[in-house]
């Protein structure tokens, strides 16, 4: 999969399936299952490191996870989430950090959060040959400014800003835009108004594609469950059951058996 491949999928009316990964074995399975794009999300800060939000993860941590993912992938597009304050200071800083994700970690593209304010930075990265996925709506790196994880685009002013931002980011050269936690009718309007794919997360069914945090949809992350997450499995319960059985077998002397020794 390539950035132009995603554009061809939108033109053909084919839905795009994306998920997150932070490690080799998960990325390998996603790739084998035909997932179109793998986002190495800064959500790792919450589901991998146990932090309350995404803000404290560093560029070096994200490069570590991205390298593990990229090493596993043969077909999917690998997109690295640029962490908080790695691109907001100025375009030069953003370019240096984004370049590391391609050079050191093997990513194909990077993702940055923000609307109209990010257009100059997006242009700078693209001019340097770095593909950019944009992200508008609920932008978790601005959670303190937003005051929570609520739905965005509720009033006319914010709706107009999101539409204008999507159009400007598309014109700037973004190859796709994540729409997070906005109403379905607004996501449909944005999707129909721009030539590049929209990838929804809590933005209804009419985006060009969808993305979820893998740990959420697998049921392995239980701290909270957003309304928009469909749990396709209960991995946490399977793991607890296996760990408990192992504990019991060891304590009862049932593991290891003669067949499991040399």
Image (spheres, rainbow, N blue to C red):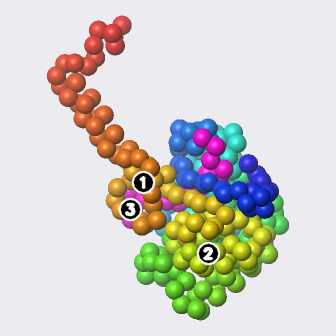
Query: Judging from the image, what secondary structure is the residue with disc 2 in?
Result: helix
Query: Judging from the image, what secondary structure is the residue with disc 1 in?
Result: loop
How far apart marks 1 and 3 lie (CA) works out to 9 Å
Q: Name the residue located 44 percent from the left edge and 50 percent from the top edge.
A: 232
Q: Whole-percent x and y of residue 202? A: 51, 68
Is residue 165 shown to the viewer in this render?
yes
Queried whether the magenta region covers residue 108, the answer comes back as: no
Is mark 3 in CB contact (under 8 Å) with mark 2?
no
Q: Give the residue at mark 1.
A: 231
Q: Whole-percent x and y of residue 254? A: 22, 18
Pointer 1 local density, CA inside 10 Å: few below 14, some 14–19, many at least 20: some
Query: Judging from the image, what secondary structure is the residue with disc 3 in?
Result: loop
Q: Give the residue at mark 3.
A: 225
The stretch of residues the image draws in magenta is: 33-52
Is mark 1 in CB contact (under 8 Å) with mark 3?
yes
How far apart marks 2 and 1 lie (CA) works out to 23 Å
Q: Give the residue at mark 2.
A: 187
Residue 113 quadrant? bottom right
């Amino acid at each position: 999969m390539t950035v132009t491949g995603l554009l061809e999928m939108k033109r053909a009316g084919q839905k795009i399936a994306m998920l997150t990964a932070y490690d080799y074995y998960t990325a390998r399975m996603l790739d084998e299952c035909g997932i179109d794009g793998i986002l190495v999300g800064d959500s790792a800060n919450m589901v991998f490191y146990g932090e309350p939000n995404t803000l404290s993860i560093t560029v070096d941590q994200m490069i570590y996870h991205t390298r593990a993912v990229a090493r596993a992938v043969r077909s999917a597009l690998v997109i690295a989430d640029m962490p908080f304050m790695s691109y907001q200071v100025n375009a030069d800083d953003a370019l240096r950090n984004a370049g590391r994700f391609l050079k050191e970690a093997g990513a194909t593209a990077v993702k940055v959060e923000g609307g109209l304010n990010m257009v100059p930075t997006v242009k700078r990265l693209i001019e340097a040959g770095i593909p950019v996925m944009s992200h508008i709506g609920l932008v978790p790196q601005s959670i303190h400014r937003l005051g929570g994880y609520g739905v965005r685009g509720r009033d006319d002013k914010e709706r107009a800003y999101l539409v204008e931002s999507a159009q400007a980011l598309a014109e700037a050269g973004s190859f796709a835009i994540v729409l997070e936690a906005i109403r379905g009718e607004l996501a449909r309007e944005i999707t129909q108004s721009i030539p590049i794919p929209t990838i929804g997360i809590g933005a209804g069914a009419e985006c060009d594609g969808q993305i979820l945090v893998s740990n959420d949809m697998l049921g392995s992350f239980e701290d909270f469950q957003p309304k928009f997450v469909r749990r396709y499995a209960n991995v946490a319960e399977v793991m607890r059951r296996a760990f408990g059985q192992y504990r019991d077998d060891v304590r009862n002397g049932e593991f290891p058996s003669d067949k499991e020794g040399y």
